[in-house]
Amino acid sequence: MTKFYEGMAEIFEVEPEAITPEFDLTNANADWDSLAIVSTIALVDDCFNVTLDGESLAACKTIGDIEALVAKAGKE
Amino acid sequence: MTRYAKIADLAGYLPPKVLDNDELAALYPSWSADKIFEKTGIRTRHVAGEDETAGDLAFAAARALFARGTIAPEDVDFVILCTQAPDYILPTTACLLQDRLGISTSAGALDVNLGCSGFVYCLSLAKGLIESGSAKCVLVLTADTYSKYIHPLDKSVRTLFGDAAAATAVVACDAEQPQIGPFVFGTDGSGANNLIVEAGGARTPRSAETAVEQSDDSGNVRSRDNLYMAGAKIMAFSLSEVPRAAAALMDKSHTSTEAIDYFVLHQANRFMLEALRKKLKVSEAQFPIHVEECGNTVSSTIPLTLAAMRDNGCFDTEKKLMLIGFGVGYSWAACLLNF
């Protein structure tokens, strides 16, 4: 389990095993609101030393989408 | 020995009315009182009364400072008030406070319109006045009442901000070394719209149109008359500029993280402070967090934290501090302080 997945599990208040690339950020149990987005910006910064843009994050539908954003930002 | 400015004393004031997490959780169905505390580190915020202005809070903080006996109103030869909630559009609230506090008419007085970076800026102004020989005793007041700008149903800001004031005496002393400084500053007005009360100034006067309330994607309600904060943008700004300012100041002053006893940052909320602490690679012991009782009190967070640390005995022997203020503007500043 990576530090990033553990952090996402804390943000969504779910068991760490629930976090996979397919995890749906927009499902009823995941509150992908402004607070979750702010928390994710701080988490990604801590884990990958990359600062994501809030609007791009808000458009993410799954954990995999966030990972793709991180990979893209890391290359820039 | 050279004439340098130093902080001689400080005092804070919190208005009596309290807003706690139970009251907020009752308004925001998706957030429990525990969740609000866990995310923000804040249990209560103090809120100014309906007829209580930032000028009133600053007055009370100044009286609390004078009551400590280190300086008296007649010692003060300059008043600086940092606020974004002046009593009137004009005249300057600092002028009203000169009169209310019984400070000499030979004193200078001015307002500074800055938010979370304001205290550090005011220290730089006070230092300049003192070390240039223009003043001997500068009363630095910070006071804000953001609660008056916040829509009751906007949890993104109502959970964070509290009203408060602080009074700091900056005086001349003879010393071998500067007691305040050096400073680094920063400004990026391109971020202005991310933390703003849009209506009510000359650009956008208040009207029936600006008072129209709207709900955002997270269910927060506000109008253009209210405080708006783009949380994600403010987080990204803080994570990028605060460590850069700290590094620039260490470089300028030829100092290192280990040589600093305490990093006293603007107390935005515990969550942001923890993120910044990790990024700055500073230990918890060097990094006070003082938000639980009063929340984010804008320009008063740093002096309120210093006063609480003083009361806990942190400064029984002289310490070296780094202060960093950052936020609305965007505006930021950092300085070293011997206290």
Image (cartoon, grey):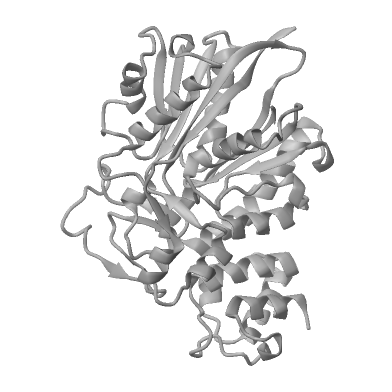
User: Picture coordinates of residue B199 (x, y %)?
Assistant: 27, 50
Instruction: Count the labels in the image.
Output: 0
Q: Residue at x 65, y 41 (%)?
A: B264
Dividing the picture into quarters, in which one does residue A3 lie?
Answer: bottom right
Q: Which residue: 46% across, 29% down?
A: B141
- B135 above or below B279? above
Looking at the image, is A1 positioned above or below residue B164?
below
Q: Is residue B175 above or below residue B118?
A: above
Q: Find residue B221 and report its image quarter.
A: bottom left
- Residue B254 locus on image (x, y percent): 81, 32
Q: Nearer the viewer, residue A59 or B8?
A: B8
Residue B242 in view of the camera? yes
Q: Position of residue B150 (x, y in %)?
A: 34, 55
Note whether A60 is above or below B326 in the view shown: below
Answer yes or no: is residue B161 visible.
no
Q: Relative to residue B259, is residue B40 drawn left or right?
A: left
Q: Residue B293: x percent and y percent?
A: 52, 50
Outermost residue toward the left in this view: B208
| Residue farthest to the bottom, as pictured | A22
Residue sitting at 78 percent across and 83 percent down?
A1
Q: Nearer the viewer, residue B135 or A13?
A: A13
> Residue at 34% of width from left, 39% of height from top?
B85
Which quarter of the rendering shows the C terminus of chain A? bottom right
Quarter where residue B304 is shown: top right
Q: Is residue B193 left or right of residue B282?
A: left
- Identify which residue, B203 or B2, lies in the foreground: B2
**Side (left or right) of B198 relative to B323:** left
